[in-house]
Amino acid sequence: MRRALLLAAALVIPVAGATVAFAPSAFAGAKIECTTISGTTVLTVSGCTGGVTGGKASGLSITVLAGGGTIHWASGSTTTIAAPTITPTSAKKCPGYVKGTHTNPYTGKEPVAEKFSAVVTADTGDGIKVPGKASGAVCVAVNGNITALKPLKTN
């Protein structure tokens, strides 16, 4: 289940970065950055700047996103991504990390962190290159809560 959460989180984040697609032509090639992600099995991505995204996407089911899928943005646009590539990374900056003990004092376990990249395969807006690339990093707490480790960006 935890690996599924990581996979889904990695998929959600690339989509958040893919919101450039909703930008007007003047934003063609612009970069999008989303600073916040929260949730466990249903996620909200917010703090999105750099395009016409409506600032967020919410109600994103991790099971729908685990193999890639379509994200519905607050602006009314959609972005579709392929399944992400996930790579483990340091969890030292994740909530719940305890330096030197390698265990969380409350649960006996540490959070995990994953870097991801995904291909944007379709978009109903303009301004994003298809195929495009989205990347970022997330923390998954022992309780399954997913948060952004690094801002989510499109290239």
Image (cartoon, grey):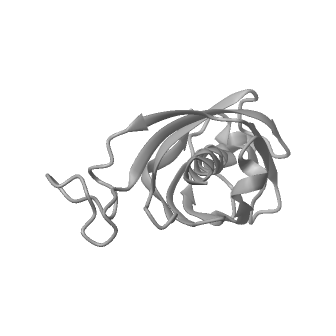
- The answer to which image quadrant residue 42 occupies is bottom right
- The answer to which image quadrant residue 103 occupies is bottom left
Residue farthest along the front direction in this orientation? 108
Measured from the top left, where is residue 16 in percent x and y?
A: 63, 51
In the depicted view, which residue is nearer to us: 71 or 97?
Answer: 97
In the depicted view, which residue is nearer to us: 79 or 28?
Answer: 79
In the depicted view, which residue is nearer to us: 52 or 147?
Answer: 147
Task: Give me the residue at 73% from left, 61% from top.
Answer: 61
Measured from the top left, where is residue 56 in percent x and y?
A: 64, 64
Is residue 109 left or right of 7 when viewed as pictured? Answer: left
Measured from the top left, where is residue 100 in percent x and y?
A: 14, 52
Is residue 31 left or right of 105 when viewed as pictured? Answer: right
Task: Give me the residue at 58% from left, 45% from top.
Answer: 10
Q: Is residue 19 above or below residue 109?
A: above
Q: Is residue 29 above or below residue 19?
A: above
- The answer to which image quadrant residue 31 occupies is top right
Is residue 96 left or right of 21 when viewed as pictured? Answer: left
Measured from the top left, where is residue 60 in percent x and y?
A: 72, 61
**Quadrant where the C terminus lies?**
top right
